[in-house]
Image (spheres, rainbow, N blue to C red):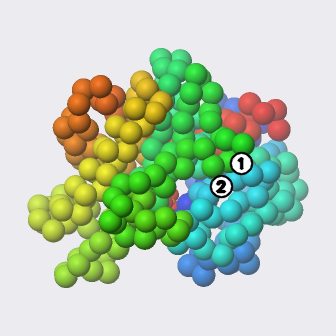
Amino acid sequence: MMTLAIDIGGTKLAAALVDNRQQITERHTLPTPASQTPDALNSALAELIAPFQGRASRVAVAATGIIRDGVLSALNPDNLGGLARYPLTETLSRLTGLPCLAVNDAQAAAWAEFRALSGAYSEMVFLTVSTGVGGGIICQGKLLTGAGGLAGHIGHTLADPHGPRCGCGRTGCVEVIASGRGIAAAATDELQGMSAKEIFALHLQGHPQAGVLVRRSAQAIARLIADLKAVTDCQCVVLGGSVGLADGYLSLVESFLLQAPAVYHTPLMTAQYQHDAGLSGAALLAQESGL
Ligand code: ADP
């Protein structure tokens, strides 16, 4: 039975066919619409899924933001503005004629990565460093979603009380400092206007100012991981997202984490599903729900 899996991020939309053994057979991506309105997202989703019409028997969506009863609400409107209450499952069922399950993207990715570890751990945190910073927490082998879908939004915990204001309305969140958007927003002088991807590439070439921005991000993530260790006593943290998966980022985070007392250390790993963790996790959750 094929699942049409869809991942809605702040930078890109992805769709793929996933079979019951979690093999991804086809993958298409589109940029997330810049106009950030429900109509723009409707059209982009219709375009994204067009090549897959009639080829799957259910839809599984992983999306940034809070997902409750199939409805998406952007926690940080800077990432998906205008989507105060977007009827995600209703829209995709209408577009495809198929049943649809929706889940937060980092929660979905956490589930895929937890399953990929084949029972080695019961306590695990998945952290995505992408357009924003998201998370999914596995506690006693179960995925925490929370009563209203908010569980795991660890990018909106405090990194710096004197830091910039976050799109969620708080000040100094981890997301506003460590995310791709945060890295780009802090760029000055010749780096101003560049994307996190471009800044990261310069950092790898030894550009000192780019290095400062990347290290600032990695340090905020390392502090977050120490906090998460204190809260969940996680046995490992899995990193994903395009910044999280970028060359050398994990070892930078590790070097900052090792500066904290040993009790806060935890093994770090990169996502086994790489950029497809959200797609795979959503498909897996849909399969397991018997949708
Ligand atoms: P989404 O947030 O839509 O899931 P990504 O995980 O690709 O998408 O994250 C997008 C962010 O990652 C952007 O800020 C982009 O500039 C940055 N990025 C993309 N590729 C790289 C890369 N190779 N190295 C570092 N940063 C990257």
Check whether the beta carbons of the residues at disc 1 and disc 2 lie within 8 A of each other. Answer: yes
Q: Is residue 251 visible?
A: no
Picture coordinates of residue 108, whole percent (x, y): 61, 42
The quarter of the picture where residue 136 lies is top right
The residue wearing badge 2 is 66
Q: Where is residue 103 in the image (x, y as percent from the top left)?
A: 68, 47
Residue 190, horizontal then vertical, whole percent: 19, 81
Q: Which of marks 1 and 2 is nearer the N terminus?
A: 2
Number of the label disc, if any, that sits on residue 148: 1
Q: Distance between the residues labelled 1 and 2?
A: 8 Å
Give whichever of 30, 182 is nearer the camera. Answer: 182
From the viewer's perspective, is 53 left or right of 123? right
| Quadrant in which the C terminus appears | top right
Q: How many marks?
A: 2
Using a 10 Å C-alpha cutoff, classify the residue at mark 1 as few (fewer than 14 neighbours), some (14 to 19) or many (20 or more): few
Please, what secondary structure does the residue beneath circle 1 have? Answer: loop
Tell me the amino acid under the disc marked 1.
Gly
Placement of the N terminus among the 4 image quadrants: top right
Q: Is residue 121 above or below residue 47?
A: above
Residue labelled 1 has its Cβ within 8 Å of some atom of ligand 1: no
Q: What residue type is labelled 2?
A: Ile
Disc nearest the viewer among 1 and 2? 1
What label does residue 250 carry, if any? none
Which quadrant of the picture is home to ligand 1?
bottom left
Q: Which of 189 and 24 is in front in this view?
A: 189
The residue under the point 59% across, 23% down is 141
Q: Which residue is drawn at 22% across and 43% down?
A: 256
> Residue at position x 63%, y 49% from top?
150
